[in-house]
Image: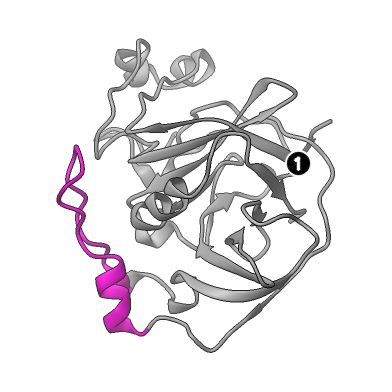
Amino acid sequence: MISNGGTADAGKINETALPGLLNRRSFVLGSAAGIGALGLAGCVTSDGMSLAEAKLAYGPVPDEKFPIPAVDVSKVDPKYFRRTVRYDTNEAPGTIIVDPANYYVYRIEDDGNATRYGANVGRDGFRWSGDAYVGRKAEWPTWTPPKEMIRRQPEAAKYAGGMPGGLDNPLGARTLYLYQNGAYTLYTIYASSDPESIGNGVTSGCVGLLSQDMIHLYERTPVKTKVVVLPA
C-alpha cells in the first residue's frame, strides 16, 4: 500500500517555471509507493567535508557522455555535503534509506556506518513513505511528460515522445526507478544539477541528489536494492 500526502503527476514540472523550458529545480515527479517505514536514527561523525574537499568532490566530471560542470558549493549548506555517519539500523548493508524530514539519503554500509547524501524531496502535500526497491536504473535517461502535465502546459507537448538525455533533462545523469511488486511506482531517485534545491521540498515525491553524489550512489546500487522512505 502507498502512503502519499497528496496527488501528483509523474514528470510534473512547476507550472510557473516553464518559459525557457524545464527548470530542474522545479522538476516534480510522483505518485505511489508503500507503507512500512522504520524509525531509524543517524548520528553525524566529525569527518564532514571541508569547503576545499567539497570543491574536489563536486568538481567537474568531464568524461561523461555530457560533461557535468562543477557544483557551486557556496550554494549548498555544508551539512548536505556527502559524508560517512554512524547509523543504527537492522537494514542490510546496501539498503537505501530516504529521510525526507531532514533532506538526507543514506546508503547503509558495514560496521554501523552509512554514506549520507544531501537531497531535495517532495514538497508539502506530495511526500510519501514506504518500502520499495530499485526495479531498474539508467544513465542519461529519456524523460517523458505525462498527458496530465501536457494538458496544463502545452509547451511541454514537444516532448510527448520523450526528451533525450542531457544536461537539461530533468532526470539528469543517473536515475534509479523505484518499484513495488513488479510495478513502477512513478517515483525515482535522480540527479539534480541545481545546488539550491538541496535541502528543500521541490518535487511531487521524487528524490534528487547532486549529480556527483548520484553517480557515487548509482555505481554502488544494483537492481533489486531495497529502498525505505521514512515518514516526513
The residue nearer to you, when weighing 164 against 110, is 110
Residue hosting label 1: 131
| Picture quadrant where residue 85 is located | bottom right
- Name the amino acid type tagged 1: Asp
Scheme by which the image is coloured? one colour
Whether the magenta-drawn stretch holds residue 60 is answered as yes
Rendered residue at 27%/82% (across/down)? 52
Quadrant including the C terminus: bottom right
Seen in the image, is 146 located left or right of residue 30?
left
> Taking 79 as reference, is 132 above or below it?
above
Disc 1 element: strand
**Residue 121 shows in this picture:** yes
Please provide percent x and percent y for residue 228. 72, 48
Q: Residue at x 26, y 37 (%)?
A: 168
Q: Main secondary structure of the magenta part?
A: loop
Seen as rendered, the residue at the extreme front is: 111
Q: Nearer the viewer, residue 126 or 161?
A: 161
Residue 160 against residue 92 in the figure, above or below: above
x%, y% of residue 208?
48, 49
Q: Residues within 10 Å of mark 1 (few under 14, many from 20)?
A: many
Start and end of the magenta stretch?
50-74
Horizontal and vertical percent position of residue 173: 33, 41
Q: Residue furthest bottom?
A: 46
Q: Residue at x 35, y 52 (%)?
A: 211
> Can residue 127 be seen?
no
The residue lying at 69 percent from left, 31 percent from top is: 7
In the figure, is residue 163 to the left or right of 132?
Answer: left
**219 relative to 44, above or below:** above
User: Would you say 208 lies left or right of 2 here?
Assistant: left
Q: Splitting the image into 4 quarters, where does residue 107 fall? A: bottom right
